[in-house]
Image (tube, grey):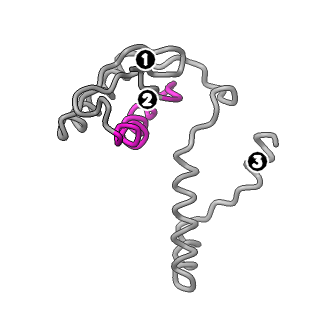
Amino acid sequence: MSENVFRQAIRFYTEEELDALEQTDPDMAYRIARAQAIAGRERRPAALDTDTRPPERAAVEHAIEDVRRILQRDGGDIELVDIVGAVVRVRMKGACAGCPNSVLDLRNVVEKVVCAVPGVRSVVNTF
């Protein structure tokens, strides 16, 4: 399915539509809002992006410092290993090394902050 056909097949509801739906079917409104939030967080594959500029190293380092402060609250740490194209390679350290929740932290915390930097498409943990 091409990108345009796929985009046309998805219907996003406005806040007003969700509020109206919540009055009649709160469970459905919640499920739709959640699905839209998840779809909004998903990144397009790099092959479909028209912006191919590499991320600025200083911006990535700043984002990593923001993440480091969050992880250090629980005894964890993170290190920037390399930037290869649009992929940022990091190393989870401290309490995060070997922790079963580090996969969730990488996806829910690290990717959310670092992928906000223009040009970054994904974050990969390097052991």
The residue that mark 1 highlights is 56
Q: Is residue 66 left or right of residue 28?
A: left
Where disc 1 sits, the SS reads loop
Few, some or many C-alpha atoms within 10 Å of disc 3 (few <14, some 14-19, many ≥20)? few
Q: Are marks 3 and 2 in contact (CB under 8 Å)?
A: no
Which residue is disc 3 drawn over?
Answer: 6
| Magenta part of the chain | 100-122
Q: Residue at x 62, y 36 (%)?
A: 44
The x, y position of residue 106, in whole percent, is 39, 36
Quadrant for the N terminus, please: top right
Left or right of 71? Residue 126 is right
Give SS at disc 3. Answer: helix
State the residue at coordinates (19%, 40%): 74
Binning the other alpha carbons within 10 Å of mark 1 as few (below 14), some (14 to 19) or many (20 upward) gives few
Q: Is residue 116 above or below residue 24?
A: above
Query: Residue drawn 33% across and 29% down?
Result: 63
**Label 2 to label 1: alpha-carbon separation:** 8 Å
Earlier residue among tags 3 and 1 = 3
Which quadrant does the C terminus fall into?
A: top left
User: Where does label 2 land, which residue?
Assistant: 117
